[in-house]
Amino acid sequence: MWLRGQDGIIRWYDPVTGRWLSKDPIGIAGGLNQYVFCRNNPVNFRDPFGLQDQASPWRVGWEWLTGRGPRQHHFAQGDPFTATLQQHGHIQGVRDTIANNLAGGGPRSGRGDYSLSGIQGIPDFISDYSAVFTGGRVGNLAAAYLGSYNLEYNVIGYDDECGGQRRAQVEFHVWNTSTIASGTRPPIIGYTQWYQRNVAAPLNRFFSSGPMSPTRQDFTWTEWITY
Amino acid sequence: MTALFSALALAFSMTLFTGLGCSSRQQLDATRFFGMWAAVERNDAGLPTIEFFQDGTFTATNLPLSVVIGPRASQPTGGGSGTWKLVEGRNGPDIQLAFAQLADRTSGFAIPIHISGRKSTDLRLFFWKGEAGEARLEFVRQSSPKEGE
């Protein structure tokens, strides 16, 4: 038998032996053993389309550094990388902005990019990167890998019947491209046009393939926000 | 000693940062932005423009939606109108654009446009084309507001 996703057959499964006959379609991003399902923990994890991406920030960083592995990851709701990113303080700030917009009749969609530019970027950089040295106990490991990232939000539904509270269902999309320039960008001056033209762009051209060449990460999830 | 080197490096960066004309914490008057601003580069639809009016509204045309909305924009370019205001961004003032409609986003779209430069002659508005630090889509002033606006 097979597990069928929206676009067709995703994985072959043998119900007699209870084993997968084909590898996980996301490759080793879900772990080195490509014949397991939901990290062998189907009670706490689900993967309705057979495409859940279990790659950690460490793994994505290693793939970028070595040039091996997928050059693009699509992280969805429930993926560990997504879950860590959702805990980033900036995301909470975006939630607050959305709630204020909803309460005040403002725009229902918009951008909420995270930037490490300027002087304010220094304490944010230190805060995010503290996760690297503390194993994620403080800071945010997802943000430490991503650095600055782009975010778009879009209200896709409402629920006015929730105990008298108004709620909106919001879809988030975060995207980021890892390049040699973004990975080595110094604070403050690294965000100037001079640096972009004279350092970052030539660096990225030099590392256009192989190790430290561009990799892309996309994250999508939905949340209910009370306002 | 390490702390001293760090402090010197930071001071050096900040000096370069200021000297290169990036936005810094500064008080800006909204009147400095009234009028028409045009992008320094065209796209297939034409020249992107944003016009700020004194009543707090604006109109925008020919914006590259992959930059403004993101990769999930359904059209390559588009325009719209809405309200604008100066807000305190992470590195100084930004202009918060609240589109009432932007292309097919009929329920509104909010995005800040950043400010660089301090003198009128080098004042620029810009969106990052990718993440912060990458190339910019810059706008320069084309005209001051007409009389009576």
Image (spheres, coloured by chain):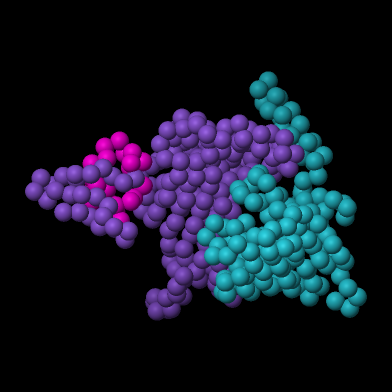
Chain colours: A purple, B cyan
> Would you say residue A41 sits in the magenta stretch?
yes
Q: Is residue B89 magenta?
A: no
Q: Would you identify the image quadrant in which residue A159 lies? A: bottom left
Front-most of residues B91 and A42: A42
Instruction: Magenta stretch: give its range.
Output: A27-53
Name the residue nearer the viewer: A201 or A120.
A201
Residue at image point 40% right, 79% down: A161
Q: Is residue A65 above or below residue A18?
A: above
On the rendered image, what quadrant is the C terminus of chain B found in? bottom right
State the predominant SS element of the stretch in magenta.
loop
Q: Residue at x 57, y 65 (%)?
A: B75
Is residue B113 left or right of A171 when viewed as pictured?
right
Looking at the image, is A193 positioned above or below residue B5?
below
Is residue A165 in sight in this rendering?
Answer: no
Of all residues shown, which one is farthest toward the front? Answer: B44
A133 to A6, vertically: above or below: above
Task: Where is residue A130? Give x, y as percent.
Answer: 52, 37
Q: Quadrant of residue B20?
A: top right
Which residue is found at the position 57% from the left and 75% from the top?
B106
Q: Quadrant of the N terminus of chain B?
A: top right
Q: Quadrant of residue B41?
A: bottom right
Q: Is residue B61 left or right of residue A175?
A: right
Q: Residue at x 44, y 38 (%)?
A: A60
Looking at the image, the residue that sits furthest to the right is: B147
Position in image of residue A46 (x %, y %): 28, 54
Residue A118 coordinates in the image, percent (x, y): 69, 44
